[in-house]
Image: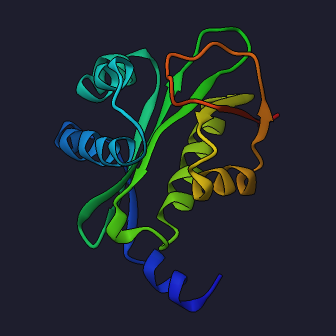
Amino acid sequence: MTAHKKYNNLQVEIVDYKPAHQEAFKSLNEEWISTHFTMEDSDYKVLDHPQSYILDKGGCILVAVYNGVPSGVCALIKMSDGEYDFELAKIAVAPAVQGKNIGFLLATAIIERAKSLHASKIYLESNTVLKPAINLYHKLGFKKVAGKPTPYARCNIQMELVLK
């Protein structure tokens, strides 16, 4: 890690989601999705109602606060399919602060949270056009899998991380 990144990391705090973060959670995700794809019904359900779709079902959302501003978000959605414990989802970092290691810090923190919740496997869906994201997932240890139905038209890659 470079000194530059260490310096920037000192300005990043990863905190638990609070209702005050709702606007940032939605806008950060809408921004990246709309830039590369089209917002879908499943996006609106989760982004408009994170309390009922994520938190009340046993998941969590972490927020990266950079220089006092919510600049990144990441969700851990409880799954009940018998194979995976959680889905890593809705990870987004503001374009203005991309490249400062915030996505890595968020994803690492969410994986640690999953471990603390005794998860054994995490699932995620993405698209290969999002090369920095795919590289991040590989760096974190995620491996490509296939065959799970997805509610998203944009999904063309599925990955898993075995924790135990």
Q: Quadrant of residue 146?
A: top right
Please count the marks in the image: 0
Colouring method of the image: rainbow
Q: Quadrant of the C terminus?
A: top right
Residue depicted at x 53% and y 81%: 5
Q: Residue at the bottom extreme?
A: 3
Residue depicted at x 75% and y 16%: 147
Residue in the foreground of this view, choosing between 99 and 87: 99
Vertical placement of 153 versus 2: above or below? above
Vertical placement of 92 versus 122: above or below? below
Left or right, 140 with reference to 39 = right
Residue depicted at x 65% and y 21%: 85
Vertical placement of 40 versus 142: above or below? above
Left or right, 140 with reference to 86 = right
Vertical placement of 156 versus 34: above or below? above
Q: Could you tell me residue 69's position as x and y percent?
A: 23, 63
Q: Quadrant of residue 126?
A: top right
Left or right, 12 with reference to 154 = left
Residue depicted at x 23% and y 44%: 21
Q: Quadrant of the N terminus?
A: bottom right
Left or right, 45 with reference to 13 = left
Q: Could you tell me residue 84's position as x and y percent?
A: 69, 20
Q: Could you tell me residue 74's position as x and y percent?
A: 45, 43
